[in-house]
Image (tube, rainbow, N blue to C red):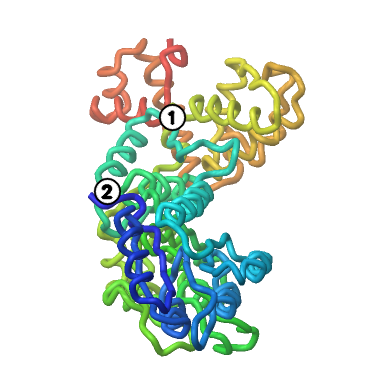
Amino acid sequence: MNSPKSIYRILIVEDNQSMREGLQASLNKEGYTVAIAKDGQEGWNQIENSYWNLVITDIKMPGIDGLTLLKKIKSISSGTNIILITAFATVDIAVDAMKEGAEDFITKPFALAELRAKVAAVYEHWQARQKPEHGQPELPVLIGNSPAIQHVRQVIVKVAASDCPVLITGESGVGKELAARLIHHSGKRSNGPFLAVNCGALTETILESELFGHEKGAFTGAHKMHAGKFEQSHGGTLFLDEIGDMSAGLQVKLLRVLQTKQFQRVGGEKFITSDFRLICATNQDLAQKINDGSFRADLFYRINVIPLLIPPLRERPTDIPLLIDYLLKVRAAKIGRKAPHVEPGVLERLRAYSWPGNVRELENFIERALVFIEENTFSETLFNFSDLPDRPAGDRSTGDLTMQVGQVEREMIVKAMRDQHGVKQRAAAQLKIKAGTLYYKLEKYGIRTEEYE
């Protein structure tokens, strides 16, 4: 199995052959992916054609020297770290170079162990930046114990071990990016980057530049070379959200990248190879978009190798109390207060609401409520239900047909269960449905015994 360090890419630029090959062998043994260049120009060629996490370069070299290389690298890839190799006579120059963005320097002669320690420090700092910010969960968390969410978890575990493209579908706010992050963190690329791009939030030109990168002067405003997300996600996962909004022209280009594993920057001529896993998401019906000619069928088959549907919150009401409890604890800790207790009446009102914005809406509601409610208990007398950003599910004066039908169905099931004193077989007969269907719908709508006894 590959070392977690194997996704960390190091380029050594050194004109002394024995030194560069010795450094390469030493760092290879540590598990890193290491390439070498015999001078500054060769190093720059490799930097232009691929993304590097760390560049180790000698300062004094013919042609492009280390300081010039440093400035060129920082002009196109501020995230690439640089360690300079210097002689004692140029230590002051190296110190000044750190002000220009160098991460560290090492003076000749040096022991290989000293360089390995410096590289390890840079790598550990890079690893720390891949983790969530302080106060956030160490890994993404999928809250809920409904059959639907248990199924989602099972699929995530199965697909995480592979590199197959995944297409996540579901309404806005259900947690499609969360599922994508779980797949990434559960798989062999977990130590690599996870990069997300919203295809619906950018114009076609900007999205193309964001994905493919661009060369200096490729278009007006392209003042320097830019490495795109295809390059930056090497060794990790690229998540394309709202893939259904991608233009027809970009769909063709994305398909070509998936077929050849190569691409060119905008305005560039060289082909670049990057190893990333692709996960896409959409809240649209791509089959319908294929029928109306706005989405390519061949691209759909490429990205839909493994489909994953995230159900809306209204179809899994038993998860709502668990989500509320989790969100209260996380959000309360974030603002430095104790998580309040939720009275049963309040919880029932929140369970009954349709949450058209799904988990995102619930999260925003909890965060807002914590700001305005000072007491340690969410009571019905203190809780302002007008804060709900939409109507309760019981108000069917407006809203979409699916939610209204669902609420009517729930009410009919509760009435039948009351009429038949909780005997499910007789309630199913009254509703003219199979008993198995009734069991499913009782779970789907979160209907509890006390509602019909």
Quadrant hosting residue 284:
bottom left
Q: In this view, does 20 lie to the left or right of 323?
A: left
Compared to 362, does 13 lie above or below? Answer: below
Quadrant of the rendered image containing residue 379: top right
Left or right: 224 in relation to 184: right
Residue at 51% across / 46% down in the picture?
A: 128
Quadrant of the rendering where the C terminus is positioned: top left
Residue tagged 2: 159
Measured as percent of width and height from the top left, residue 70 is found at 57, 74
Please state the horizontal and vertical placement of residue 276, each as a whole percent of the image.
Answer: 35, 63
Label 1 sits on a secondary structure element that is: helix
Give left or right: position of 11 versus 72: left
Query: Residue 396 or 67: which is nearer the viewer?
Result: 67
> Could you say where residue 431 lies in the image, as x and y percent from the top left?
32, 27
Nearest to viewer (mark 1 / mark 2): 2
Residue under label 1: 410
How many numbered badges does the structure rendering display? 2
Tell me if I can see residue 13 in this picture: yes
Residue beneath the point at 32% across and 69% down: 21
Three-letter code for the amino acid on which mark 2 is drawn: Val
Name the spot of residue 37 as percent of width and height, x first: 39, 77
Camera-side residue of 427 and 4: 4
Q: Could you say which is closer to the camera, residue 144 or residue 38?
A: 38
Residue 249 at least partly seen: no
Which amino acid lies under the numbered mark 1 shown in the image of this protein? Arg
Q: In which quarter of the image is residue 145?
A: top left
253 and 145: which one is in front?
A: 253
Residue under the point 30% across and 13% down: 423
Residue at x 48% of width, y 48% of height: 124
Label number found at residue 369:
none
